[in-house]
Image (cartoon, rainbow, N blue to C red):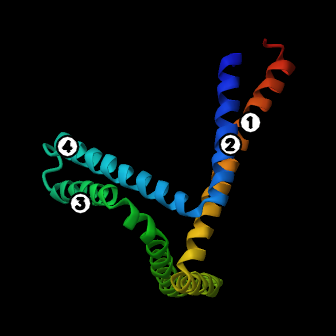
Amino acid sequence: MKTSKKIWLCIVGILLIAMGVYCFSNPSLTMLTTAQILGIALIVTGITEMVFTFRTQAFLPFSGTRMLSGLIDIMFGCFILFHIFGAAISLPMVFAIWVIIEGISVAVQSFDYKKAGFSKWWLIFILGVCAAVLGFFGMRNLAATAATLSIFIGIALILSGLGNIFAVIGVSRLEKAVGIR
């Protein structure tokens, strides 16, 4: 690997680590940035779905729902970007509601595993109930939920940055062992 690429990977790694640390200290700004990224991602996803629909409608004639889904994604993305502060404030609540719904869904699905003969179905049930309970706690204290989300985002960024740096170290050691320079 060229030295310039290694330097860039290290710089990106250091920036990701710095952003991760920044997320720990500024949960409200993290929610604002996450809302912006979500809005942009929804718009890009919607455009992609619509382009896919146009390109495949000849052999997928009933793809109107995909077109509708793309349009809704674009509308939600625009709504989020035009109301960024409201979106940032609501992210912890939306996340908590999502955790509640997912937890209930997992708990209900555990009974299908029971019917299928899976002996540890009850573990799936307990995990689903625990997720739902955590979602309810998250709804009760949205500031703590925002701080927790910021910590998780920060940890993810730090781990990604460390991954870049360790990748450069690993490649450098491999190149040295093989005799590439």
- Image coordinates of residue 1 in percent, x first then y, are 69, 19
- Report the Cα–Cα distance between label 3 and label 4: 19 Å
- Image coordinates of residue 40 in percent, x first then y, are 36, 49
- Horizontal side of residue 111 vs 50, given as left or right: right
Q: Quadrant of the C terminus?
A: top right
- Horizontal side of residue 122 vs 98, given as left or right: right
**Foreground disc of the pair 4, 1:** 1
Identify which residue is drawn at 56% across, 82% down: 141
> Dot 3 lies on which element?
helix
Identify which residue is drawn at 13% across, 51% down: 61
- Give amino acid for label 2: Gly
Q: Earlier in the sequence, mark 2 or mark 3?
A: 3
User: In the image shown, does 180 or 94 lie closer to the viewer?
Assistant: 94
- Report the Cα–Cα distance between label 4 and label 1: 42 Å
Residue for badge 1: 165
- Give amino acid for label 4: Thr
User: In the image shown, does 37 or 107 lie closer to the viewer?
Assistant: 37
Question: Alpha-carbon neighbours of circle 4 within 10 Å: few (<14), some, or many (≥20)?
Answer: few
Q: Earlier in the sequence, mark 1 or mark 3?
A: 3
Identify which residue is drawn at 28% across, 51% down: 46
**From what the image shows, is residue 42 above or below residue 55?**
below
- Give amino acid for label 1: Ile
Q: Which mark is residue 56?
A: 4
**Foreground disc of the pair 4, 2:** 2
**From what the image shows, is residue 77 above or below residue 4?**
below
Residue for badge 3: 72
Residue for badge 2: 161
